[in-house]
Image (spheres, rainbow, N blue to C red):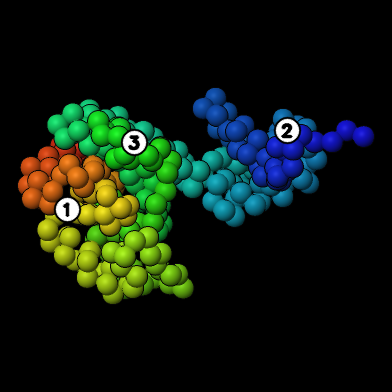
Amino acid sequence: METSPPENRYIVPGLVRGMRLLELFTHKQQEWGLSELARALHMPRSTVFRLVHTLEQLKYLEHHPQRKTYQLGNRVLNLGFEYLASQELIEVARPFLTTLNEQTGCSVHLGIPDDREVVYLLRIAGHQHVASNVVVGTRFPAHATTMGRILLSELSLQELEQMYHGMVLEQVTEQTVTSIVELYQLLCKERERGYTLSLSGFEAGVVSVGAAVRDSSREIIAAINITGMETVFDREALEGEIKDRVLQAAEAISNRMGYRG
C-alpha cells in the first residue's frame, strides 16, 4: 500500500487548494469566473465555490456581481506590499548598517514588529566571537530586547494592556520587566532618552543599543541595534560614541525611507 512521504503528513489539502486558486490570479488574467476556476484547477464547481466564498469572506478575493467574476482583494495585495516594503527597507538599510558594523566592530541588526515579537530581517556579524548568534527570521519577545522596546515605545499604557491581555511577560533575565506598568515606565524613559540600552539585559555578558527607523508617516516601522561583549564596551562608551553612531545610522535610514523629522 502506497503511503505519503512523512513530510507531507501535515499538509492541509484545503489550504493547498486555496493557495493554488490564488496563484491563478496574474497580471495577464486578473479576473476569473467560477466555472473558469473550476476548469483550470480540475476541481468540482461546488468545491471551488466553497474556496472562493471563504477567500472572499477573508477579503483575499473580491466579487464583481455584474461580471460574475473575482479578483484579488485588498488583504492579499497588502501582504504583497508588506513584503516589498520589507525588501526595500533591507536594501536601504544595508549600506548604513555595514558602515555601523565597520565603525563599532559589533554585530548589527534590523528588526520589524510582529505583534509581541521582534523579527530579525538583517544581521551583519561583528568582529567579536560571541556577540550575536541570531539569524534572519529569528524572533524574540519585544519587551525584553532593545529593538523590541523601540518598536513598543510609542504605545500608550492602554494599548500595552490590550496587547498583552491575558499574557505573562516572559522573564528572560533578572533585569526583564515582568509587569505592564513597569514596561510602560521603562518605555517612557527610553522614549525620552531617544534610544534603548541593555547591559546583560537579554543575554549575560552582552550589551546592546537600539534606535528607531521611521518612514514618511513619521511612524516607527523598524528598529536597529548593535550588540557587543560587555568586556569590550563599558557603559560610558555605549552611551557616548556607540550610541551616537547607532542614532546616526537610524536617522540616515529613516531619511532614505522618507522621514523628515
Amino acid type of disc 3? Leu
In the rendered image, which residue does mark 1 sit on?
Answer: 195
Quadrant of residue 20 within the rendered picture: top right
Looking at the image, which is closer to me, 257 or 148? 148
Query: x and y percent of residue 258 in the render?
Result: 19, 39
Residue at position x 23%, y 54% from top? 198
* Mark seen at residue 122: 3
Which residue extends farthest top? Answer: 28
Q: Earlier in the sequence, mark 2 or mark 3?
A: 2
| Position of residue 227 measured from the top left corner of the image (x, y, whole percent) | 25, 43
Circle 3: element type: strand
Cα gap from disc 2 to disc 3, whole angstroms = 38 Å
> In the rendering, at what x and y percent does residue 25 appear?
58, 33
Please name whichever residue, 228 or 254, is drawn nearer the observer in this view of the structure.
228
Tell me whether circle 2 and circle 3 mark residues in contact (CB < 8 Å). no
Which residue is identified by label 2?
A: 41
Please identify the quarter of the rendering in which residue 248 is found.
top left
Tell me if mark 3 has few (under 14), some (14-19) or many (20+) residues whose alpha carbon lies within 10 angstroms of its own. Answer: many
